[in-house]
Image (cartoon, rainbow, N blue to C red):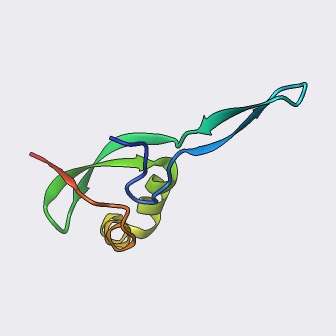
Amino acid sequence: MSKICQITGKKAMVGNNVSHSKRRTKRTFNVNLFRKKFYWVEQQEWIDLNISAAGLRTINKVGLDAAITAAIEKGYLKEIRIIG
């Protein structure tokens, strides 16, 4: 699984490590990403999402069904893993 949030679409960014002598080397800024199970009440089933902390706050704010439909419209959510 790639390091992309399925709700917000956040993914790793590339930047520079800057040392004390101002020497720059490439580095990646990874997303705070984890896998979480949710109970989707409208579909009466458990789903498994790969989400970031910002995605979890979005789900808490607008609800799971609204967050999933918005992610599908924006193209962030291609497939939903159904558990059981």
Q: Nearer the viewer, residue 75 or 23?
A: 23
Q: Is residue 71 above or below residue 54?
A: below
Quarter assignment of residue 26: top right
Which quarter of the figure is the N terminus placed in?
A: top left
Quarter assignment of residue 45: bottom left
Residue 35: image x %, image y %?
Answer: 34, 41
**Does 7 sit left or right of 18 as displayed?**
left
Residue 69: image x %, image y %?
Answer: 31, 72
Q: Residue at 32% of width from left, 61% of height from top? A: 77
Q: Residue at 52% of width from left, 54% of height from top? A: 54
**Does 21 sit left or right of 9 as displayed?**
right
Q: Residue at 40% of width from left, 59% of height from top? A: 7
Which quarter of the figure is the C terminus placed in?
A: top left
**Does 1 sit left or right of 19 as displayed?**
left
Q: Nearer the viewer, residue 23 or 72?
A: 23
Q: Residue at 64% of width from left, 34% of height from top? A: 27
